[in-house]
Amino acid sequence: MCGRYASAKDPATLAAEFDAADAMGDAAPDLDYNVAPTKSVVTVVQRHPREADGTVDRSRTERTLRVMKWGLVPTWAKDASGGAKMINARSETAAEKPAFRKSLAERRCILPADGWFEWRRDKTSKQPFFTTPRDGSSLAMAGLWTTWRDKADPDAPVLITCAVLTTDAVGPLAEVHDRMPLLLGRDSWANWLDPDSTDVAGLLAPPSIDLVDGLEIRPVAQAVNSVRNNGPELLAPLEAEALDLDAPDLFSGRA
């Protein structure tokens, strides 16, 4: 699963990395080392632009950074309260679920991340781990998005929400948790984001072991457990003697 992650690169850096225009403006979220459900998050989308008269120009697409709320609220939902429970969508079943299937077909996005947090449990404790690219690049977490309108208040702004797709954990990541975000390699970004691409089944498989080999898994302090804590110290590796769990292979920092 993915219930907490870090997004601490500025919009200009993300725009360059994902070859996207920054369309967030003043709505851009602050740098966040402890992104939690229902927060506003940065996403990458690719859509056909509209002309001044509202006509969709299907001859071209634009890739942009957009702000969405993490926790998908289906268009048919009576209210927005259920979004906090729909932060993840299982890649294996998203095409079948009423809440996700239309978004999978038509509204896909990428959620850039410096890395994600996961908790490894034993009988008496939970140890948080942070998984991040060794080279400092951003992860591209596959996501779905949609829009929701409050029928009781036609003047209310449209709510744009998203969910992270998850998949079976690969290799040593399974030592921490059996699920992980669905990560997209750079060569998959264009097809995933293409609004005219209807066949993305091949991109829903767990990431390759080569991609996973480029990740570092490191134990971090319990401070990340509280969403009130937010700062680069949350990403700092714990010393071996501070670990509650016996995880020598993970602590070595090698995936």
Image: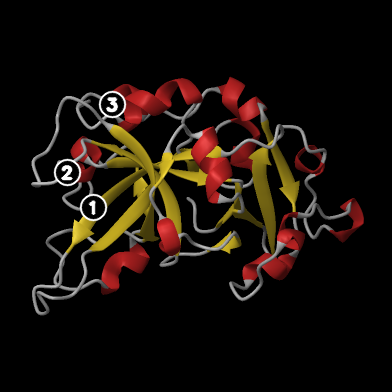
Please tell me which residue lies in front, 16 or 83. 16
For marks 3 and 1, give the one nearer the viewer. Answer: 1
**Quadrant of the image containing the C terminus:** top right
Query: Which residue is label 1 attached to?
Result: 146
Residue sitting at x 49%, y 62%? 29
Mark with earlier residue (1, 2): 2
Residue 253 horizontal/vertical position (percent) = 78, 38
Task: Say whether residue 53 is left or right of residue 158.
Answer: left
Residue 159 horizontal/vertical position (percent) = 25, 64
* Numbered disc 2: secondary structure: helix
Residue sitting at x 30%, y 40%? 108
Q: Do we see residue 169 in this rendering? A: no
Looking at numbered disc 2 in the image, what kind of residue is underneath it?
A: Lys
> Is 117 placed above or below 12 here?
below
Please tell me which residue lies in front, 70 or 50. 50
Do residues under tags 1 and 2 come within 8 Å of each other at their CB atoms? yes
Looking at numbered disc 3 in the image, what kind of residue is underneath it?
A: Val
> Is 100 placed above or below 183 here?
below
Residue 100 horizontal/vertical position (percent) = 23, 48
Query: Which residue is label 3 attached to?
Result: 200
Task: Say whether residue 43 is left or right of residue 159.
Answer: right
- What label sits on residue 118 in the rendered view? none
Distance between mark 3 and mark 2 Cα atoms: 13 Å
